[in-house]
Amino acid sequence: MNKICPSLEEAVSDVPDGASIMIGGFGDAGVPFEMIDALVAQGAKALTIISNNAGTAQEGIAKLIHLGRVRKIVCSFPRQADSKAFDERYLSGELTLDLVPQGNLAERIRAAGAGIGAFFTPTAYGTLLAEGKETREINGRHYVLEYPISADYAFIKAYRGDALGNLVYRKTARNFGPVMATAAKCTIAQVTEVVPVGALDPETVVTPGIFVKRVVQVGPAVGVAANANAPARP
């Protein structure tokens, strides 16, 4: 079973209009910018994007928003320095927002991957974000019922991957990638280096290949033969 795709274009070629896509990253760390660019070129529109933020300037997610390809975004903090693309589309009514506290976002995605039907959390109780949601008092504390978030696709970035889809991340670039990989129907991983099967130390594999459909190498080509026995870095 070889999950290696020869190009980003082929990896994202079947993303249809109206698809929901999780995109990993925190700030710039772990954002699969090249895969997003391939999606821009592919042309899919009316997308629902699930991510930690709405991007900045006109790069990555912000580029998709600027081009009018996104109809809805689910994120923790849409507005930040130079978030002009989001501001313009949201204020004009062309883009809808589902604001989710960061911890809730991570847990709702994790719940989808773990098969959890719903969970109670104290986060957002008593705020506008809890309006219309079921609440409950448990042991004297108030909680809000939250449901899982899943998606058609997950675009994530990893450091190393093999033909079976096993992934190793690098430091803070790990962030949302592991939980998103478990919560999408089709996870596509952009990696810096593809190594032979068996070259990754099983103890360092964060995302097992069972959760990954496609792997694409992006970045400087690395001779896999010379690196076959090299220790995998996190």
Image (spheres, rainbow, N blue to C red):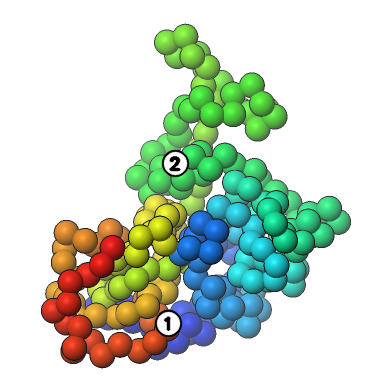
- Side of 46 relative to 181 (left or right): right
- The residues bearing labels 1 and 2 have C-alpha atoms spaced at a distance of 29 Å
Residue located at (23% from left, 62% from top): 205
Q: Can residue 18 be spotted in the picture?
A: no
Q: Identify the residue at the far top of this view.
A: 140
**What amino acid does circle 2 point to?**
Glu
Q: Of 82 and 134, which appears nearest the observer?
A: 82
Q: Position of residue 157 (x, y in %)?
A: 42, 68
2 relative to 23, above or below? below
17 relative to 219, above or below? above
Q: Tag on residue 107?
A: 2
Q: Where's the C terminus, which quadrant?
A: bottom left
Q: Position of residue 9 (x, y in %)?
A: 51, 85
What residue did someone put label 1 on? 218
User: Which quadrant of the figure has residue 230?
Assistant: bottom left
Q: Of 84 and 48, which appears nearest the observer?
A: 84
Neighbor class of circle 1 (other Cα within 10 Å; few <14, some 14-19, many 20+) is: some
Neighbor class of circle 2 (other Cα within 10 Å; few <14, some 14-19, many 20+) is: some
Q: Of 155 and 31, which appears nearest the observer?
A: 31
Name the secondary structure under disc 1. loop
Q: Position of residue 38 (x, y in %)?
A: 56, 80
115 relative to 32, above or below? above
Residue located at (21% from left, 61% from top): 204
In this view, the mark in front (1 or 2):
1
Residue located at (51% from left, 56% from top): 26
Q: Can residue 82 be spotted in the picture?
A: yes
Q: Identify the residue at the far right of this view.
A: 92
Q: Where's the N terminus, which quadrant?
A: bottom left
User: Which quadrant of the figure has residue 56?
Assistant: bottom right
- 1 and 2 marks in contact (CB < 8 Å): no
Q: Tag on residue 198?
A: none
**What amino acid does circle 1 point to?**
Val
